[in-house]
Image (cartoon, rainbow, N blue to C red):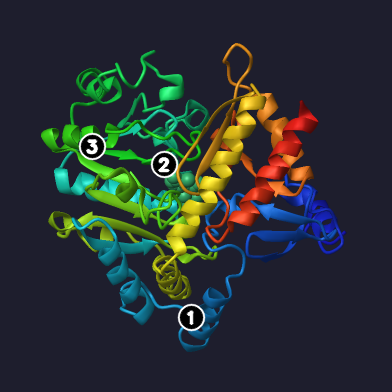
Amino acid sequence: MDERGAGYAAGGPGGDPQRVAQYRLGDAELVRGEGVRCWDSAGREYLDCVSGTFNLLLGHGHPEVLAAVREQSERLLFASSSFRTGPTDQVMEELVRISPANLTRVNLRSSGGSTANEGAIKIAQWHTGRRDVIVPFRGHVGQTLAAAGLNGSARMRAPFPYRFPGAVHVPGPYCFRCFYRQTPDTCGMLCVQRIEEFIDYASSGSVACVIIEPISGVGGNVVPPPGYLRELRSFCDARGIVLIFDEIQTGLGRTGEMFAADLLGVQPHMMTLSKGLTGSGLPLAAVLTEERMADWDRSLHGFTHGGHTLSAAAAVKTLEIVQRPGFLENVRASGAVLLDRLRRLQQDHPVIGDVRGPGLMLGVELVEPDGGKAVAKAHAYQRALERRGVLTRVSEHGLGNVIELRPPLVLTPAEAQLVADRFGEALAAVA
Ligand SMILES: Cc1ncc(COP(=O)(O)O)c(C=O)c1O
């Protein structure tokens, strides 16, 4: 043991990392990745149906992205986001070009989703002169102290005493378990209309923005009913509230359209992007705003590694690839294969209550015979899938009952069949 103590000696080279990590590590040590597959140190192959942390949009080690990063690393590894660089200029221009037409400005000074969301909220507060933030139940804003206080799940807020004081949580558009015990055809969209009462009685009366994932990812792959986001946008417009779409999971082709805003036909006032933006796992985040928000004082939101030059080089290449002919068609085709096969499995397995999602953003909700949430079963199936070489996640950071599938967008229809085969095997084995 050296003077750094027992922990270091145990976890140093040849030691046990499980003893020095401040959290529980998985059993496998991943050593290599290529496309939708990765391998552990024992040589086991996995189909990575969660794209790393939902961020490897183009899979592991996309050769063109790697080449762009390598080339940039030799020219200029990093420049402060106060300066222009070729890659950051191109990323911003391209994002404005492909995003909804009303979004004309980009803040590229964050490197992660939580800080991009906080940036969007700060811009909305600055612009409106108001304070509160509305977040749907189950919404995930992030893990920084302020974002954690905004998350739409009590579990994420409970341990921290200094919660964001202006968080207003409202029921989300989760028709499978409707808060108002309605059905989509008769509900009158209460999950929008009743927000009025939350503003009147649960807020400070000074509401700056609503921040919502158009399709809630961590919250259980919750797809809103047709018309929900349009009605929410009208609701916000009528009250001068800024509508922010967190497209950190849904953006850049994940749903089979470039943005969920396109898929669902609604322009938000602001949009945040991160995760898939660099295709490859390098960190970068963007906040897109309308022109009217351009008077923002840029010193109020920026981070050391924001707009990282290497990440921007990866993003330029990623943005080019996702716009190539056939790219989004492949997402839709592979997604349709997987959705169809999973829905067929649902017919034979009553434990599957719902299969939902567009493109390659799919969720399989597991239910108890009485309709309750089958949380333990979700974990059993996830483990059975992993034993069959398919990596998935369970919603609500492992506490939910929805198995999340978000493979890299380069998944082929044949690979989608393979994932579905393994899903069927896992269902049969656990049942
Ligand atoms: C929808 C959504 N928003 C925000 C975040 C936070 O992003 P980050 O972990 O990069 O801070 C996540 C991360 O999982 C997310 O899924």
Q: Does residue 345 appear to the left or right of 270 in the view shown? A: right
Q: What residue type is labelled 2?
A: Val
Q: Kindly state the secondary structure of the residue where label 2 is placed.
A: loop
Residue 133, by quadrant, is: top left
Does the residue tagged 2 have its C-beta within 8 Å of any atom of ligand 1? yes
Number of the label disc, if any, that sits on residue 77: 1
Q: Which amino acid does label 1 sit on?
A: Leu
Q: Give the residue pinned by disc 3.
A: 230
Residue 383 in view here: no
Q: Give the residue pinned by disc 2.
A: 141
* 426, 111: nearer the viewer: 426
Residue 415, horizontal then vertical, whole percent: 64, 55
Q: Does residue 392 appear to the left or right of 169 in the view shown? A: right
Q: Residues within 10 Å of mark 2 (few under 14, many from 20)?
A: many
Disc with the residue nearer the chain's start (1 vs 2): 1
Does the residue tagged 1 have its C-beta within 8 Å of any atom of ligand 1? no
Q: Does residue 427 appear to the left or right of 49 in the view shown? A: right
* 134, 194: nearer the viewer: 194
Which of label 2 and label 3 is nearer to you?
3
Quarter occupied by the N terminus: bottom right
Q: Do the CB atoms of the residues marked 1 and 3 lie less than 8 Å apart?
A: no
The residue under the point 54% across, 41% down is 339
